[in-house]
Amino acid sequence: MNPITMNLIADDIIRAALREDMNAGDLSTESVAPEARAAEVQLIAKAHGVIAGLDVFERSFTLLDPATVFEAHAKDGDEVEPGQLLGVVRGDVRVLLSGERVALNFLQRMSGIASYTRTMAAALEGTRTRLVDTRKTTPCLRIFEKAAVEVGGGHNHRYNLSQAVMLKDNHIDAAGGIAAAVAGARAHAPFVCTVEVECENMDMVREALEAGADIIMLDNMTHDQMAEAIALIDGRAKVEASGNVDAGNIRALADLGVDFISSGALTHSAPILDLSLKHLRLL
């Protein structure tokens, strides 16, 4: 993660997590380690996967004590195996014990997303289709989860509501139709913003094309319906496929020739990667 971003955004999230975990101290650590003692502990993989978030892991300790040192034996994007030593954390034993769970929570979550994304992205090798994420992220953790998608080989869709226009069914209903919704977006949004329209049937695709949408999302359509829609669009707009995308059907969607495939599962359904801090040793 960019150090500037870390300082501006990520630090606040990590501090909030640390406060949540010990808002009035750490009773367990205070009981067994009342005084500062130098120590080290090993970061070990317990499953196969892709590591992501080592900078966030490290920052969870250095925010407690800047003197803490993390000696990494792997880097973001590396595939790791069970039993592999990924690094060593050295510092005040109280910091190692108190920061352990928060640091691991971030690292396991980000690594799980990167691992799942890597599997999905591998199915698109040799195609021009980009795998993209969505806004279906854990509240307040979006910056970490979208970073993990990139580590895994995916790409980021819009970061938030301020970045681009996406007109879904409820927006279209609120505007009174696709033409009115797109016209409103062109009048209101900055000219650099793209306008994407979510379409559920061929009539909506035709309306979005006539309205001049930049991107047309084919949402929960059948394979045959998407093929028909892509033929109709014929390069006049970018095409995104979405809805119930998984490793079993993603290649078939890409073979249709869509520009993007979006999957909320990358961030809302990826299991964590099992990691552990073990073998703490006083120095």
Image (spheres, rainbow, N blue to C red):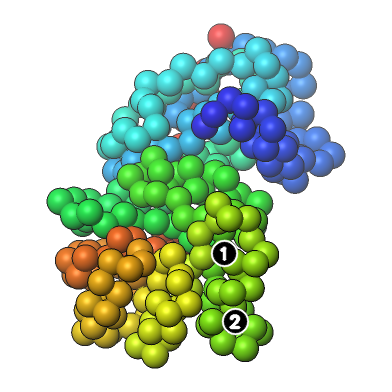
Q: Give the structural element (helix, strand or loop) at label 1.
A: strand
Left/right placement of residue 16 relative to residue 162 reads right
Label 1 vs label 2, nearer the camera: 2
Give the mark nearer the N terminus: 1 vs 2: 1
- Name the mark on residue 180: 2
211 vs 249, nearest the viewer: 211
Quadrant in which residue 182 is drawn: bottom right
Q: Is residue 148 left or right of residue 26?
A: left
Q: Mark 1 touching mark 2, by CB under 8 A?
A: no
Q: Amino acid at mark 1?
A: Val
Could you tell me which residue is drawn at 64 percent across and 73 percent down?
184
The crowd level at tag 1 (other Cα within 10 Å; few <14, some 14-19, many 20+) is: some
Which residue is at a point 66% across and 51% down the rendered structure image?
140
Q: Position of residue 60 (x, y in %)?
A: 62, 31
Can you say whether 257 is above or below 39 in the image? Answer: below
Residue named by callout 1: 165
Q: Position of residue 113 (x, y in %)?
A: 42, 50
Say which of 7 and 176 sits in front: 176
Which residue corresponds to the image point at 39% horizontal and 49% vertical from the top-left?
155
| Residue, far right | 24
- Residue type marked 2: Ala
One can see residue 45 in this view: no
90 or 138, which lies in front?
A: 138
The image shows residue 72, relative to residue 230, as above or below, that is: above
